[in-house]
Image (cartoon, rainbow, N blue to C red):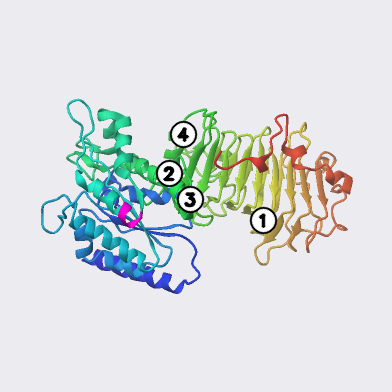
Amino acid sequence: MKNTLCYILFALFLCIFYSFDSERRNPVIYMIGDSTMADKPLSGGNPERGWGQMLPGFFTPNVCVENRALNGRSSRSFRNEGHWDPVRRCLRKGDYVFIQFGHNDQKMDTARHSDADTDYKANLRKYIDETREVGAIPVLFTPIVRRKFNKEGMLLDTHGRYADAVKDVAAEKRVQLIDLNRLSAGLLEKYGEEKSTSLFVWVNAGTCAALPKGKQDNTHLNVRGAREIARMVAGVIKKTIPELSSHVIMYDYVVAKDGSGDFFTVQDAINAIPDFRKKGRTTVYIREGVYKEKLILPESKINVSFIGESLSGTVLTYDDYASKKNIFGEEMSTSGSASFYVYAPDFIAENLTFENSAGPVGQAVAVLVSGDRVVFRSCRFLGFQDTLYTYNGDSRQYYENCYIEGTVDFIFGKSTVWFESCTIHSKRSGGYLTAAATPEEKAFGYVFYECRLTADNMVVDVYLGRPWRPFARTLYIGCDMGKHISPAGWNNWKKPDAEKTVFYGEYRSRGEGGGRKDRVVWSHQLTRKEADRVTLKNVLGGEDGWNPQVVGILK
């Protein structure tokens, strides 16, 4: 009773919120139907999912999917029990209502039964008419098939006239139809009688806390089956509903804490990626949540993309640090402290937050990048000392529109890296933005292009860089520098000999911290001719002509 009351109050809140949002343009999809569509509880490792539960993972984040489908309901009982009224009150012009009934209309109890050619059709017509009254858009779905094969291994029809009745009403009322009965039948026939059990809730006894006695259910889908059905639905939407088409994205895997994805954890998704997949890019969509995991993307998981649902709401974090003891009582070291290790080449991340949450405890790396041709776009890197470790001297990396924060040496390492339109944020006075360790044979180390250097209030005396190794190379091109930047600009880390071997330079620095007259004499103010040679092609192109600005997140 308490849960039902909370559900009703939440539904009313959404209605009130949307009623005041007169300029709302983002699509809203309401789903009404039975258990094959409905959201399922996750307790006890419950493997069951409704396909509607998985559908949000195929849309851009601005699409609101309200799944109101409920277990055991028919087109009759869903209305008679009062579940339709809250949806109807929320509907606005341009909203969508996805309607899928049929499994329970076949039941013979009076509360649910509807004759396929009379009551069932009448119920569907009424949902359609009431949806259209406010300018919302109904979409009819035929019911998904049950897994029932005959002795010859042929899939049997268990819905009789109910699937045809949906088609009849769709044609009569000129409503968009998605024939899930046909699509799901094709899926099961493709898998065959034996392998199709992998799509349904087939669980051995003693293997799942939610189903301790086991279960062989040929109606209800598991995670894999629900994702497959949702993928087919999304594919049809992309082809047939233009207003929603641009919002459909077909990710290979979805990670979600709410059970709407293939996996609950990011590492499980990584482990599922085929090794050395050279003919395609594997995309992993990570829905909102804080994922506390120590992640490793091994060298064999090439051509992988991570896409976050929201920049601030999708957080990959861990809290190791250099002086923390491992299981052998030894200090982890800086390299061992990373929250995320990227060893694979051609990795792309977008719209994610990467964090080391250990706090101000010394070296604590958020991300260690060793792979070549790595791209981060619109990401945040949170930490204190040693936030971003650009580890490998042969690694080329590109960061665009990213936010990187820290205290001391929070961008450091050997790699060749281009930072474009990034915000580099200092959290402590007397700190250092960079500690490059550029190999002697490399022409470039770090290039900051049109970046903003910002700081917490009262932070002062921050240096642009200091040399971790003697041939460190760091350039700031057209950057806006806050007043927290030390007038001297650069620090030699008490290594006077390094002043002769490093190359620290600026071109047209601006802002309160961009003054030139007090910079250390061993740094460089580039001429226009020198600055013109600092191009993305010259810095990152290499022998293979890599251009990160044309690399797509999905392919």
Determine contact: label 2, label 3, CB under 8 Å: no
Rendering coords of residue 525 (x, y %): 86, 50
- In primary-sequence order, the first of circles 4 and 1 is 4
Mark in the foreground, 2 or 4: 2
The amino acid type of the residue labelled 4 equals Ile
If the image is split into quadrants, where does the N terminus sit?
Answer: bottom left
Q: Residue beneath label 3, please?
A: 245
Q: Quadrant of residue 134?
A: bottom left
- In primary-sequence order, the first of circles 1 and 2 is 2
Q: Residue beneath label 1, please?
A: 423
Q: Nearer the viewer, residue 163 or 278?
A: 163
Q: Is residue 520 left or right of residue 462?
A: right
The amino acid type of the residue labelled 2 equals Gly
The answer to whether residue 334 is visible is no
Task: Label the magenta part by its dominant secondary structure.
Answer: helix
Q: Residue beneath label 2, please?
A: 235
Mark in the foreground, 4 or 1: 4
The amino acid type of the residue labelled 1 equals Thr
Rendering coords of residue 534 (x, y %): 80, 43
Q: Residue beneath label 4, please?
A: 273
Q: In which quarter of the image is residue 535?
A: top right
How far apart in space, not on screen, are marks 2 and 4 (Cα)? 22 Å
Q: Residue at x 52, y 57 (%)?
A: 312
How far apart in space, not on screen, are marks 4 and 1 (Cα)? 32 Å
The amino acid type of the residue labelled 3 equals Ser
Q: Is residue 81 above or below residue 386?
A: below
- In primary-sequence order, the first of circles 3 and 1 is 3
Give the extent of the magenta segment: 171-175
